[in-house]
Image (cartoon, rainbow, N blue to C red):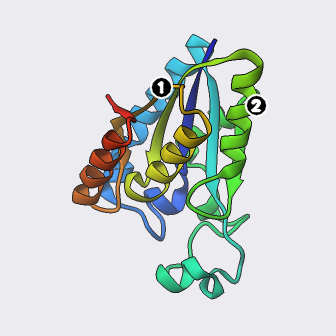
Amino acid sequence: MKRVLVVVDMQTDFVDGALGTKEAAAIVPAVRARLEKARRDGEEIIFTRDTHPEDYLNTQEGHNLPVVHCVKGSKGWQIVPQLTEFTQPPAVIIDKPTFGSSKLGQLLQEENSKEGIEQVEVIGLCTDICVISNALLIKAFLPEVPIVVDPKLCAGVTPQSHETALQAMASCQIRIL
């Protein structure tokens, strides 16, 4: 049985770029410390990366959130420099075109069937969009595996939406640490 740490969208555009917030910037040192612990403890580390095309504004998401961000290959698309050393193999990076990643769910489901997953911890940005989407998606793929979220290692678009997302996840049997 193994533990998995999923680090959602800790990208420049969400920390200090196009959609950055002071709350997102504030969690970076704690996320780094959590990654150091995961590495020491032998946990599997999976990063997701929000990934959009150049014509983002022509997509459904772009119509609803008309702020160009995380365009593949751009500076804003990159994992923040403070965390890039943790993206090297055996860590996995999954590029996702939308909030939740079915590829992530499938990967975890396959791994669970092979060797068993004891727990999946989800941290990162933004609590109220991509963290909640991926936590619920993982719960759907792995209904018997405990899914946990550490609110100190997440930040939402606003502090209020962060709290609302944590409450929603808790109602769906995702343990909030």
Disc 1/disc 2 C-alpha distance (Å): 16 Å
Question: In what element is the residue under mark 2?
Answer: helix
Q: Which mark is residue 166?
A: none
Where is residue 13? Give x, y as percent.
Answer: 52, 63
| The one of 164 and 109 positioned closer to us in this rendering | 109
**Type of residue at label 2?**
Glu
Mark 1 / mark 2, whichever is N-terminal? 2
| The one of 28 and 121 positioned closer to us in this rendering | 121
| Rendered view: 71 above or below 129 | below
Question: In what element is the residue under mark 1?
Answer: loop
Q: Which mark is residue 146?
A: 1
Residue 171 at least partly seen: yes
Q: Specify the quadrant of the image occupied by residue 28.
A: top left
| Rendered view: 18 above or below 119 | below
Q: Name which residue lies at 56% across and 71% down.
A: 69
Q: Is residue 151 left or right of residue 75?
A: left
Q: Which mark is residue 110?
A: 2
| Rendered view: 29 above or below 38 | below
Q: Quadrant of the C terminus?
A: top left
Q: Is residue 137 left or right of residue 101?
A: left
